[in-house]
Amino acid sequence: MREYLLRHRSLDIVIKLIGVAIVLPLLAATPIFGAFQPFNGWLTGFANAAIFVMLAIGLNIVVGKAGLLDLGFAAFFAIGAYTYAFGASAYSGNDIPFWLMLPIGAIVTAIFGVAIGAPTLRLRGDYLAIVTLGFGEIIPNVLLNSDKYTLGTNGISGLNRPELPIIGVFKSNEPWPWFILAVVLIGVIMIAADRISFSRIGRAWEAIREDELAAASNGINTVTFKLLAFAIGASTAGIAGAFLASKLSFVSPDQFKFSVSVTVLSMLVLGGIGNLWGAAIGAFLLYFVQSILLKQLNEGFKGVPVLGEIDFLQLQYLLFGLALVIMMLRRPGGLFPERRAARHRVGTAKE
Amino acid sequence: MGSSVAWAKRNSVFLWVAAVAIAFFIAVPPVQFVNALTLGAIYALIALGYTMVYGIVELINFAHGDVFMLGTFVSLSILIDVIGVTGPITNPIQLILMLVLILAVTMALMGAVGFLIEKLAYRPLRNAPKLAPLITAIGVSFILQNVVQLWKGPYKTTFPQFFPMDAALMLGNVRIGLINILVIVVALILMVALQLFITRSKTGRAMRATALDPTAAALMGVNIDATISRTFVIGAAIAGAGSVMFGLYLGITDFSIGFLAGLKAFTAAVVGGIGNTLGAALGAFTIGFTEVGATVAGFSRWKDAIVFILLVAFLTFRPNGILGSDSSDRA
């Protein structure tokens, strides 16, 4: 059985995800979980966490596989979300169905990925990191200031929600459809990411990551493959953006700040750079630390001297910062290190 | 180094910059010209730390902007809680003593912070892959922001204005605030001192040797660890001077200023030619003029985006900056 699954990687992913999709709601129904928040709250939380799981998988392709540090990943997230807002909202007057907007969002962000990557991918690693950081600032800035089209800080609200024949339009207070949709999207993204990683393209990325010069001299067109990594990573963020926009039915530039890029990077570092499941689990864990645990600590310590006065939610970025530093110093491979290249445990080799 | 080609190139660049500055001077009101110089001077004080560290270890010290931010809070706390300054000081001797005191204390404390950051977060990773210290740098940046947020709260905090803000110098009918002159002069003094230190002192020579080739420098008896550590200390101390100037000039600070200020100062370092201390100053004034120019032209909302576009454009098309580093193979 195990060997069969090793040879059928996509089936393996499907089975594992179905397992997760069954276990999580069951867990949420137990009294222990119920003590934290009601069942529907958990289910909504899972669907929200899924957005970060998608982002982490996308960033894992760029940072983990190809070894390109992208510090402005939220820019692609923003482009995906705003593409959705322009394609499917009363504000824009367009009424393209959600299911069509998913591939459109992916394609538009992939085009942006190529447009941003093409002039900059020749730069060495740390310069590239800064250029992506620059773009990560420019894009929300442009969205904020082009208020003629984007309504600026107010954001665009009343975006269309997904619709299916039997279920009808997804509602914000009914978490089940969102949860299932999230699992399906993650499944598609994971299978795609996994198949690409174990293809010729994936091997080329790893070669570039380990030693760009050696890769180039072995006939790998490094610019093409780096661009591909950028485009595929970006399109994943585009899908996550479309999902977020339709789920909240609202987009604003505030949702795509630098802290989002760093949050996703922290998730990746925590889970294990380069490892698909590591990225997903890291994202899932950190999302719940952020959205449930810290809030619960606030509630739990209410009235307790000293501890009760600390706002644990304020501590979240301190924790992220500490996680980044400590993980890099003590466990650079993350909680679940990438198996194939244990020799080089951090994203890239030197130059 | 000493070739006449480099000299000519350097001077042609200066002529070009001078021409731009003169054009700017004619195009905008003199007050704005002084503002641009002042802003540029503050950016220069931050940019020096970026460029020195990059020059020696090729690390973008992401936390540097937040060291600057921490400096504004450390100096304002010392001023309010330790010294007890409330209003402007009018006695010129007292004023100068106070300035020297707060600059010295802030620079010393920030130097210590720089030392600690290098020792704890970067040194253990010196032989690790390039991305590792970059990621810890982002981590340190977040830690510093949050520590300040927990310490002082997430609000804007006013900086004690002990410098008489209404004092001004009249040049003809142009009014130049003393504060502007102070910021520019302090920045110039520190830049000249740094330049002398790098070119004349023994540590400076060790720094240049390490930047050029760490292995060869070590073989010649340079203590690499100590030299790198000193570079971080000096960079952080100069940023500390920048914090005091920023606080006095703008009179307000908050925990998040480090990100934007740091990114702009980094842009300055890149525009001038990273690794080159003179270039950092040149780049910083370019950024100052760009921002003020954008404001004067009515694009004040776009000034951040314009600076970032400048950063992306330089990194992409001219990664060696205006002056370029001596080792132009770096980019």
Image: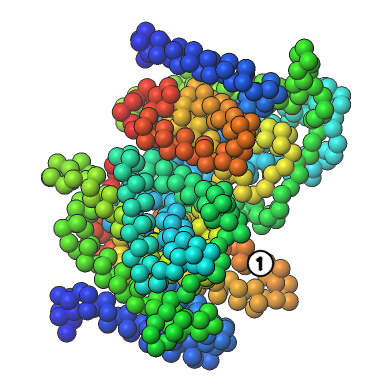
Task: From the viewer's perspective, tell me whether residue A181 is left or right of residue B44.
Answer: left
Chain of the residue where label 1 is placed in the rendered structure: A
Q: Residue at x 33, y 31 (%)?
A: B330
Q: Residue at x 40, y 72 (%)?
A: A97
**Rendered view: A219 above or below A273:** above
Three-letter residue code for mark 1: Asp
Task: Quickly name the residue at label 1.
Answer: A311
Residue B151 point in image, percent of width and height? 69, 54
**Rendered view: A223 above or below B27:** below
Q: Secondary structure at mark 1?
A: loop
Q: Residue at x 78, y 18 (%)?
A: B169
Q: How many numbered marks, from 0 up?
A: 1
Q: Nearer the viewer, residue B19 or A293?
A: B19
Q: Say which quarter of the image contains residue B221.
A: top left
Task: From the viewer's perspective, tell me whether residue B200 is left or right of residue A233.
Answer: right
Q: Nearer the viewer, residue B147 or A137?
A: A137
Q: Quarter holding the C terminus of chain B?
A: top left
Q: Say which quarter of the image contains residue B312.
A: top left
Residue A262 point in image, percent of width and height? 47, 56
Q: Say which quarter of the image contains residue B319.
A: top left
**Residue at the limit of the structure toward the top, as seen here:** B4
**Rendered view: A255 above or below A186:** above
Q: Nearer the viewer, residue A75 or A338?
A: A75
Q: Quarter holding the N terminus of chain B?
A: top left
Q: Residue at x 27, y 82 (%)?
A: A15
| Colour scheme in use | rainbow
Question: Taking the image as drawn, is residue A113 in sight?
Answer: yes
Residue B17 point in image, percent of width and height? 51, 18
Task: From the viewer's perspective, tell me whether residue A278 is left or right of residue B37.
Answer: left
